[in-house]
Image (spheres, helix red, strand yellow):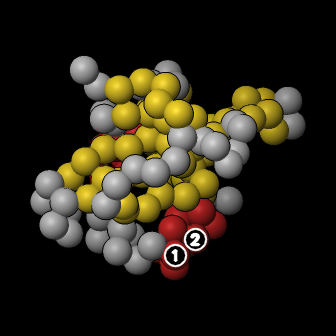
Amino acid sequence: MNISRISCPYLEIEVELTAERETHIAERHPDLLPQYRYVIAETLAEPDQVRRSQRLENAKLFSRWYNDLRGGKHVVVVVVSGEFRGTKRHWIVTAYMARKLAEGVVEWSRS
């Protein structure tokens, strides 16, 4: 399986982005991938905000605002954490652009 690893200082670990999830993001959110792949890593490295997902108990939504992205957009990267074969894993399940943030309880915000 082809897996990219992206540093996430907030979780103090590298987060996985599998080829299957990257394909999912490119198909569902073509405004983000492949052209703006770099913003996924930037959003995980230096988020403006981290929220706990209301839909998935074990997911966090990392978001970062970009003034220069399609007239101004948030990039949201959803990271799921869990056990897999006895090992703790963190992986990106999806990523997308949004005009405003709607979901989740704020866990951390850049001051």
Q: Determine whether 73 is above or below 27 in the image.
A: above
Q: As drawn, which residue projects farthest toward the right? A: 85
Label 1 residue SS: helix
Across and down, in percent, residue 8 comes to 44, 32
Image quadrant in which the C terminus is located: top left
Residue on which the image places disc 2: 24
Task: State whether residue 36 appears in this view.
Answer: yes
Across and down, in percent, residue 107 comes to 49, 25
Q: Amino acid at mark 2?
A: His
Whether tag 2 and tag 1 are in contact, CB under 8 A, the answer is yes
Across and down, in percent, residue 78 comes to 53, 48
Residue at 44% over, 41% down: 62
Distance from Cα at disc 2 to Cα at disc 1: 6 Å
Between 58 and 5, which is closer to the camera in this rendering?
58
Quarter residue 67 falls in: bottom left
Residue on which the image places disc 1: 28
Residue at 40% over, 50% down: 101
